[in-house]
Structures are given as C-alpha cells and as structure tokens.
Image: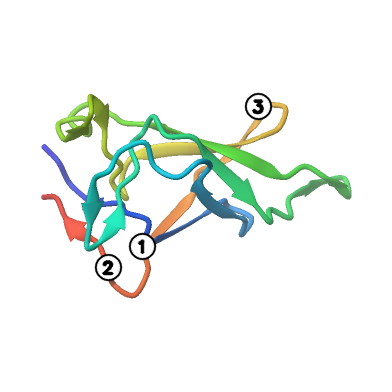
Amino acid sequence: MLSGNLINTGFTISCPHGGRVTPASGTSSGVRLDGLPVPAATDTFGVTGCRHTVDRVPYPCVTVRWTPGPGDDAVRIDGSPVLLDTTSALCFSAALVPQGPPVVSPLSGRGVCAR
C-alpha cells in the first residue's frame, strides 16, 4: 500500500550535510504535478554544496540512489516507480561510499498525499 507524498520538483531535497539534491538532467518524463515536473526513481540525482569532510579532507556527497521498496512501485511513470517522500535512498560520495539518507521536505507545503 502506498503511503507518503508524491515528490515533484517543488520539494526540497538535501543530503545529510546540507547539500542540495536535484535531478541531474531534469526529469525523464513529461509528467507534472501542481505544474512542476515529477521525477522517477530511475532519474539521476546530483548533489551540490555538500560540506562533508573526513579528517578535514572534503568528502562530499555527489549522487543519490533511490530504492523503492515493496509496494512503493505501484505508481509508475513510463515503467519507472515515482518517488515518495518515504522512498528509501542513500547519498554517495564520488567513490560510491554511502553517506546517509537524503532529507526530503515539501517546499511551501506543496505535495500530494498518495495514501
């Protein structure tokens, strides 16, 4: 059963260190919600402005990978699961080291409940 809000580009998504997460090349579909593009789990997401360091050496998050769980993939765009604010994801460094889950929140209260 679906539970959560359908993500569109009106949501604020950040890495655990405050970097901004955005679809790297826009969204792959022409689907819109509230006039804003709706990304799919297969879209590529990049991270900019991450300030994470390890022993004072910059080790920023650069990508996000979404992993829809059972039931999260009931709604699809061109065969790809849509993203909900409850969809599992991890941010990764350039060396593909997991650095924690992204923080997802609606911007200005936008978003549609998909319950």
Please, is residue 14 above or below residue 2 in the view? below
Q: Which residue is mark 2?
A: 110
Residue 96 numbered tag? 3
Residue at 65% x, 40% y: name it.
62
Which mark sits nearer the N-terminus, 2 or 1? 1
Crowding at mark 1 (Cα within 10 Å: few <14, some 14-19, many 20+): some
Residue at horizontal 79%, vertical 48%?
Answer: 53
Q: Find residue 109 and report its horizontal and vertical position in percent.
A: 29, 72
User: Could you say which is closer to the camera, residue 40 or residue 50?
Assistant: 40
Relative placement, left or right, of 26 versus 109 is right
Rounded to the nearest whole Å, what is the CA distance between mark 2 and mark 1? 7 Å
Which is in the foreground here, disc 1 or disc 3? 1
Left of 74 or right of it: where is 95? right
The residue positioned 14% from the left and 41% from the top of the image is: 2
Tell me the quarter of the image containing the N terminus. Answer: top left
Residue 100 horizontal side relative to residue 68, left or right = right
Report how far apart the C-alphas of labels 2 and 3 lie in the structure.
32 Å
State if disc 1 and disc 2 touch (CB < 8 Å): yes
**Residue type (three-letter) at the residue carrying disc 3:** Leu
Q: Which residue is mark 1?
A: 10
